[in-house]
Amino acid sequence: IKRLQESDPRMSGAVVHGDLVYLSGQVPADFSQPLDTQVKSTLEKVDALLKEAGTDKSKLISAQLWLKSMDDFGAMNDIWIDWLDPDNKPVRACVEAPMAHPDILFEAMIIAAK
């Protein structure tokens, strides 16, 4: 088992076990930004963590997505579809949930193959 980005005392940013890469919940760097910027920023963090783990979004297996409000579902989906590798779509769930910080609008947790 290899753990990446361990500076947070609560969790690793990613864990590699065998041929699988598990990302912790990723949120935007700047919570004050609007939804589109938060989603794009979060997906940039996903890309960077996947790269650090030796993989990329073409190998996504599963995505769990959280929105602060389902009113943002359509806008988030447009950004998600533009980011996603269209030939390698993961299984996915998206739910509305209270966030750890009141200004977070989007969070993503990803599992990918190596």
Image (cartoon, helix red, strand yellow):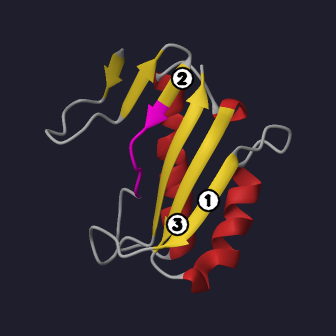
Name the residue beneath numbered marker 1: 93
Which span is picked out in magenta?
22-27
Please name whichever residue, 44 or 55, is drawn nearer the observer in this view of the structure: 55
Check disc 2: other Cα within 10 Å, few if <14, some if 14-19, many if 20+: some
Name the residue beneath numbered marker 3: 37
Is 14 left or right of 102, judged from the image as shown?
right
Mark nearer the N terminus (1 vs 3): 3
In percent of width and height, residue 74 lies at 70, 77
Type of amino acid at the residue the image marks with label 3 = Thr
Check disc 3: other Cα within 10 Å, few if <14, some if 14-19, many if 20+: some
Q: Give the quarter of the image for residue 94.
A: bottom right
Q: Residue at x 49, y 55 (%)?
A: 41
Q: Residue lying farthest bottom?
A: 71
Q: Give the quarter of the image for residue 72.
A: bottom right
Q: Mark 1: which secondary structure?
A: strand
Mark nearer the N terminus (2 vs 3): 2
Q: Depth-wise, is mark 1 or mark 3 nearer the camera?
A: 1
Type of amino acid at the residue the image marks with label 1 = Ala
Q: CA distance from mark 2 to mark 1?
A: 19 Å
Check disc 1: other Cα within 10 Å, few if <14, some if 14-19, many if 20+: few
Is 110 left or right of 98, judged from the image as shown?
right
Residue 66 lies in the magenta-colored region:
no
Mark nearer the N terminus (2 vs 1): 2
Q: Residue at x 75, y 56 (%)?
A: 82
Q: CA distance from mark 1 to mark 3?
A: 21 Å
Q: CA distance from mark 2 to mark 3?
A: 28 Å
